[in-house]
Amino acid sequence: MAIIHHTTLSPTKLELLAEWLPLRPWYQGVEKSARLAKAGGFRLDDPEGEVGIEFMVVTDESGPEPVSYLAPLTYRGAPLEGAEAGLVGTLEHGVLGTRWVYDGAHDPVLVEQLLALLAGGAVAQAQSETDTLDPTVEVRSEGRGVPAGLTGPGKVADTAAGTEITAGPAGRDAPVLTLTLSRVLRPGTASGEGLLGQVLAGWSAADGAAERGAFAYLRA
């Protein structure tokens, strides 16, 4: 169970993301620093209780039109070996001290818990409350469904639309499935050939309207 500490962060998550987002290939703004507002999200629990896992939605209003982005983040008490490419930055937590913040696409704890969520082996937690489920997050099974026991990340590739992560059954060398994170959020569901499952959740648009769409989906 993740414990949510309501305390100070320096820099804040939004300040870290404002510098990191414009460096991503899927960023649609033109400014070197984004102007962000928190717009929603949820959490997952690390079974070992060591890593914070948050699926954070932020809306950038620096461009001509507001754009909402998904930032799946992990928070660690020490650097994650081999994940230098996924480091967003470090911050000082008022209770826990220095935290290393990673793009969760590069963190096996987040990826495997997201795969477990898709397979029905994990449940979404409220973003800002301890030990509270988030019933608004929907896991939708498609086709033959998502098998249990998937591992990842394998190869991580950013595209103009999102991030693709290879994953596969535990104990096998060759990854066989593709987990996609929808970085630029749009209302609606994922569709198309090979779809096995998707996670649907909501966020608030810049004008306050409630939006809902696919945060992540798995294809064969």
Image (cartoon, helix red, strand yellow):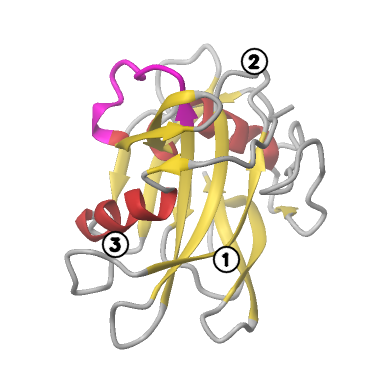
Q: Residues within 10 Å of mark 2 (few under 14, many from 20)?
A: few
Return the residue nearer the eye: 179 or 105.
Answer: 105
Front tag of 1 and 3 = 3
Please, which residue is most extreme toward the top here? 171
Q: CB atoms at circles 1 and 2 under 8 Å apart?
A: no
Q: Are marks 1 and 3 in contact (CB under 8 Å)?
A: no
Residue at x 48%, y 32% (from the top left corner): 93
Amino acid type assigned to the residue bearing label 1 in the image: Ser
Q: Within 10 Å of the Cα at label 1, are there few (<14), some (14-19), or many (20+) other Cα atoms? A: some
Q: CA distance from mark 3 to mark 2?
A: 32 Å
Where is residue 187? Give x, y as percent.
Answer: 58, 76
Q: Which residue is mark 3?
A: 26
Is residue 28 rendered to the left or right of residue 174? left
The residue that mark 2 highlights is 48
Q: Which residues are magenta?
A: 75-85
Residue bearing mark 1 = 191
Q: For residue 156, which quarter of the picture?
A: top left
Q: For this view, does 214 lie left or right of residue 147?
A: left
Picture coordinates of residue 168, whole percent (x, y): 50, 27
